[in-house]
Image (cartoon, rainbow, N blue to C red):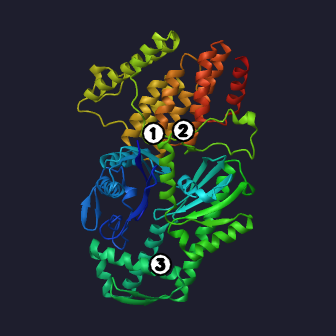
């Protein structure tokens, strides 16, 4: 049945979309301007401070309202309204239904932000939704220019700059790695000019300083600061600022500072690109093209600086049009609709220059990382299924883990009721209730349980630590570490189901994390290898197929598959 697929570029200051159907109908649109305000207001942190204007997109998943153009709204509600409008425009004048929707997001988007975005999309009636990183969408959107090789993509958006390495081979696209450039984007530039503008007013005793008393005044000042930034970027030094009723002229010191600042940020971008290449085992000579996309990339001085840095490394630079991300998202959506997805939004090994026909037989289609985890079976139902299949060891291991987890939960329930730590005597429970355990204390307990081999308990404690302090990245990273190390400790056939579930749990928390995806492939390969050694060839082949879906370039898995194929 013919449907309309939708590609959405969820930007920092606006939203672009492109749609199309197999019958040839297509269109594009943009949501921007007064009707679709996309910047929230954050008051100054203290006297003499400067207000901030974070993107609504960056506030997703924070479970709090934001002030946008004088009204308090939940970011999720604003995004839902915008996506519903896109759906209405895409389906206007047609009787077709909506098919797949792909929305582009920064790779650094957290699991919470991604989850909030998917929920907003579903509330808008978008149906099947997939998230795709901005850098991958940029390469996919360059259909006419797509050539094999490694592309270095630099997305210079409002909220910051993100780098991505994307390998293109035989019509397939794979993300090799990602990196950020600190404080380089439209928001950071606007904030610097806003601080300079307000500071100059205060020094001169200008009445415009009164605009800092409320959100409306700060918005007018931000608009003026943006005009100055865009004017300097275009080479102008005289500015008419109707939002604050002033005319200003930038002195030479300001112009030179702007040039130095941009030069320093471009140098930092080139340096981060070089370190990203080293992290992925590549060199500048492996990069076929350096692609720029985003509003900051349109600043002539930025483009010139990148050209100079790329020229020193003999790399060609291309500046992509504003609609490239939406076009890439649409192309990906159409491929998903026809079950021909050729993209993997995950880091992997760089493609070889040429693969022999024999090698190509083992390069399977690459799955896209799902927008949200599919419904899972309960541990008990999985254990029952394993038992029915005659896989007694795995069924027993999973059932015993359920018992351990339930016992630990019962201890927590009793402890929470009495204000005691698990394992303490009820009779010794103090009155009144003791302060709750801190995240660091819970993590310390998790480390001890892990050292004792009590992995399920360790992971449960790590989860509690993160729930206690969800905004602490160090706590989050430690929770992920406990998952991964526990899952790879003494791997065997009997504990495979338990360990792979721990890795899947980590992957759901750290969406798209290359380390975890690689561990999933490695742990699945180990299971295939062990099954092969025990002569359970049919089960080994099934596990091996799963490992290669996760990482088609897993060399030991490819060799084992050749051996298994040779026996058939």
Q: Earlier in the sequence, mark 3 or mark 1?
A: 3
Q: Earlier in the sequence, mark 2 or mark 1?
A: 2
- Which label lies toward us, 2 or 3? 2
Residue 326 appears anywhere in the view:
yes
- Which label lies toward us, 2 or 1? 2
Crowdedness of circle 3 by 10 Å Cα count: few (<14), some, many (20+)?
A: many
Q: Which mark is residue 357?
A: none
- Residue on which disc 1 sits: 509
Alpha carbon separation for disc pair 2 and 1: 19 Å
- Residue on which disc 3 sits: 229
Looking at the rendered structure, the secondary structure element under dot 1 is helix
Looking at the rendered structure, the secondary structure element under dot 2 is loop
Crowdedness of circle 2 by 10 Å Cα count: few (<14), some, many (20+)?
A: some
| Residue 27, percent from left and from top | 42, 60
Q: Which mark is residue 367?
A: 2
| Residue 225, percent from left and from top | 41, 78
Q: State the residue at coordinates (69%, 45%).
A: 351
Q: State the residue at coordinates (61%, 59%).
A: 144
């Amino acid at each position: 049945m013919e449907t309309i697929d939708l590609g959405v570029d969820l930007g920092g200051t606006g939203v672009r979309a492109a749609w199309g159907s197999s019958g040839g109908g297509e269109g594009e649109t943009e949501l921007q301007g007064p009707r679709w305000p996309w910047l929230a207001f954050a008051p100054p942190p203290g006297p003499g401070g400067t207000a901030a204007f974070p993107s609504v997109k960056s506030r997703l998943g924070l479970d709090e309202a934001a002030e946008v153009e004088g009204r308090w709204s939940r970011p999720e509600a604003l995004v839902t309204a915008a996506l519903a409008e896109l759906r209405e425009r895409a389906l206007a004048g047609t009787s077709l239904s909506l098919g797949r929707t792909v929305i582009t997001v920064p790779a650094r988007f957290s699991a919470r932000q991604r989850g909030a975005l998917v929920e907003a999309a579903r509330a808008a009636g978008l149906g099947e939704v997939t998230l795709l990183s901005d850098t991958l969408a940029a390469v996919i959107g360059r259909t006419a220019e797509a050539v094999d090789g490694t592309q270095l993509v630099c997305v210079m958006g409002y909220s910051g700059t993100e780098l991505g390495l994307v390998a293109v081979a035989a019509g397939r696209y794979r993300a090799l790695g990602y990196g950020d450039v600190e404080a380089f984007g439209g928001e950071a530039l606007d904030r610097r000019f806003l601080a300079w503008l307000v500071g100059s007013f205060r020094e001169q005793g200008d009445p415009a300083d009164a605009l800092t008393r409320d959100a409306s005044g700060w918005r007018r000042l931000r608009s003026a600061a943006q005009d100055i930034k865009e004017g300097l970027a275009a080479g102008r030094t005289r500015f008419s600022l109707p939002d604050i009723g002033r005319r200003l002229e930038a002195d030479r010191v300001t112009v030179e500072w702007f040039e130095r600042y941009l030069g320093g940020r471009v140098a930092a971008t080139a340096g981060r690109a070089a370190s990203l290449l080293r992290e992925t085992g590549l060199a500048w000579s492996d990069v076929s093209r350096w692609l720029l996309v985003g509003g900051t990339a349109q600043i002539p001085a930025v483009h010139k600086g990148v050209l100079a840095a790329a020229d020193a490394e003999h790399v060609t630079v291309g500046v992509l049009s504003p609609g490239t991300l939406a076009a890439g998202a649409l192309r990906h959506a159409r491929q998903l609709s026809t079950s021909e997805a050729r993209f993997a939004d995950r880091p992997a090994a760089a493609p070889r220059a040429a693969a022999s026909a024999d090698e190509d037989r083992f390069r399977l289609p690459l799955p896209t990382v799902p927008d949200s985890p599919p419904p899972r079976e309960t541990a008990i139902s999985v254990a029952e299924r394993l038992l029915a299949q005659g896989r007694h060891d795995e069924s027993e291991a999973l059932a015993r883990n359920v018992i351990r987890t339930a016992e630990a939960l019962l201890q927590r329930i009793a402890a929470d009721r009495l204000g005691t730590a698990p394992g303490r005597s009820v009779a010794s429970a103090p009155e009144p209730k003791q302060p709750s355990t801190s995240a660091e204390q819970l993590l310390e307990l998790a480390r001890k349980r892990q050292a004792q081999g009590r992995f399920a308990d360790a992971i449960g404690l790590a989860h509690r630590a993160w729930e206690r302090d969800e905004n602490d990245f160090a706590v989050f990273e430690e929770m992920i570490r406990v998952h991964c190390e526990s899952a790879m400790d003494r791997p065997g056939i009997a504990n495979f189901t338990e360990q792979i579930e721990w890795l899947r749990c980590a992957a759901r928390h750290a969406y798209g994390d290359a380390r975890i995806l690689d561990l999933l492939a490695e742990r699945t390969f180990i299971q295939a290898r062990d099954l092969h050694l025990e002569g359970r060839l049919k089960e080994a082949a099934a596990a091996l197929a799963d490992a290669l879906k996760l990482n088609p370039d897993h060399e030991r898995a490819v060799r084992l598959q050749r051996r298994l194929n040779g026996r058939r």
